[in-house]
Amino acid sequence: MARQPRLALPGYPHHVIQRGNNRQPIVQDESDRKMLYSLWLEESQRHKVAVNAYVLLDNHFHMLLTPPNDEAMSLMMQSVGRSYVRYFNKRHNRSGTLWEGRYKSSLIDSEAYLLTCMAYIDLNPVRAGLAESAEDFHWSSYKHLTGQKIDKLVTPHALYWGLGNTPFAREAAYAEFVAGGLSVATQKDLTESALKGRVVGRPDFLTSLEKSTRRQILPQKAGRPFKKRPRP
């Protein structure tokens, strides 16, 4: 069966996951991290893709991207992926693939799940045991969104701006939201939805999206479809 084209719609945030092949490291030191970051910055600006949140760990990364058109996100990710693999292989005297296939993504219902997905991304280092709190980790969007540093890569989503009337109010509100944490069920749902390419949203949002895109969005019932028996 042919693989269904990735769902990427302009103006909607998309949760993106890219893993190293066989969970191998995609960065080995600060030089690698700086190179990957610089490629993200260059290509997101080139394709006008807004990076609403991100985190870079040793063997994978997460991003929340809002593209301006159907192709921009894919073009950005492809360009970053190719350029970084060339750099990484040359620098570390290796060959072959680095990524675990193509990147995974899921479209997010921003009204209901945007802040949750942002917090999920910024809390990744805590879940991985790499930091005691989100603010202790350098390679994420958390410090920009809480006013602790200026990060050129991050473009806050419009709903983030709605957290308060002043920068301090917005930053404090987001910090409080992240500090509240996320349930295990929510974390699992966001991870699996991205890996499976499933849209994350409210039932009415899913129904509306299915009608507008003419694609299967709503979950299908398990088992074979019921067939009526012919009358004798």
Image: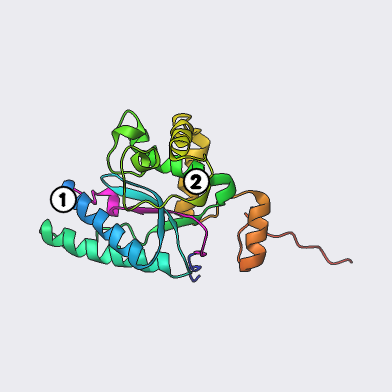
Crowdedness near tag 2: few (<14), some (14–19) or many (≥20) residues, C-alpha within 10 Å: some
Which residue is drawn at the image coordinates 35% and 30% (left, top)? Answer: 133
* Image mark count: 2
Extent of the magenta region: 8-28
Which residue is drawn at the image coordinates 33% and 49% (left, top)? Answer: 61
Q: Are marks 1 and 2 in contact (CB under 8 Å)?
A: no
Q: Position of residue 200 (x, y in %)?
A: 55, 50
- Residue tagged by mark 1? 31
Q: State the SS at label 2.
A: helix
Q: State the SS at label 1.
A: helix
The quadrant of the image that shows the C terminus is bottom right
Q: Is residue 53 above or below residue 78?
A: above
Q: Is residue 106 above or below residue 169?
A: below
Q: Position of residue 151 (x, y in %)?
A: 31, 48
Q: Position of residue 169 (x, y in %)?
A: 47, 35
- Which numbered dot is residue 161? 2
